[in-house]
Image (spheres, grey):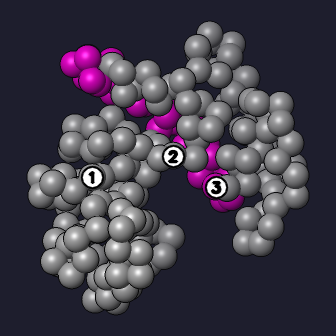
Amino acid sequence: PISLELLARVAHTIPKIPVYYYHIPFMNGINVSVAETLMKARTLAPNVIGCKFTSTDFADLQRCTKNGFNCLVGADDMLSYALAAGVDGAIGITYNFVGKLHAAIIDAYMKGHHTEAHEMQKQSTELMYHIKASGNLNGACFYLFEKQRGISLGASRFPVYKLDDDLKLPLEKYVSDQKMNNSPFF
């Protein structure tokens, strides 16, 4: 597949730098077996060491981790489940403004408090539900970052665009409700 060819070509141009495959099929339409792609790529370029996995195919993710690849989950609303599948870490967009929540999920999971981790995961999943409901994932996250951190990110560049004012209200209500319920993460 073209993803394998591209991954091998990139890795060959930078042979001393570790290379990750970024798997995000819902945004780019490329839905391949990551485990197979990584295993084949590793035979062509040994500096292919893992992936950022942003998919719901946890069987594929688990095959990646069981084959020794370094895997980072890229879906904030699936962190605790990905930890159970053996990921090594996470990279997520909401970690910029509710990082304490996700750090607490990882901490609880690593201490063996899986039920607690899954309960906190529900908060992340609910947050992502509200963000996705805006229809503008990046715009909603940028807006929440600015609100939570008090820092302006400035103008957005194409293809990212600011969140429309009418779409800010549901997010503001959600965050306000979390604060009123004494959530330590908002």
Q: Amino acid at mark 1?
A: Asn
At mark 3, the secondary structure is helix
Left or right for 158, reference 127: right
At mark 2, the secondary structure is loop
Q: Could you tell which of marks 1 and 3 lies nearer the N-terminus?
A: 1
The alpha-carbon separation of the residues under discs 1 and 2 comes to: 16 Å
Name the residue at 35% across, 74% down. Answer: 15
The picture places residue 65, in percent across and down from the top left corner, at 18, 52
Q: Could you tell which of marks 3 and 2 lies nearer the N-terminus?
A: 2
Quadrant location of the C terminus in the rendered image: top right
Left or right for 127, reference 102: right
The picture places residue 84, in percent across and down from the top left corner, at 22, 37
The picture places residue 85, in percent across and down from the top left corner, at 21, 44
At mark 1, the secondary structure is strand
Is the residue 175 above or below the residue 82 in the image? above
Label of residue 70 in the image:
1
The alpha-carbon separation of the residues under discs 1 and 3 comes to: 26 Å
The residue carrying mark 3 is: 137
Magenta-drawn stretch contains 118: yes
Is the residue 119 above or below the residue 44 in the image? above
Q: Residues within 10 Å of mark 2 (few under 14, many from 20)?
A: some
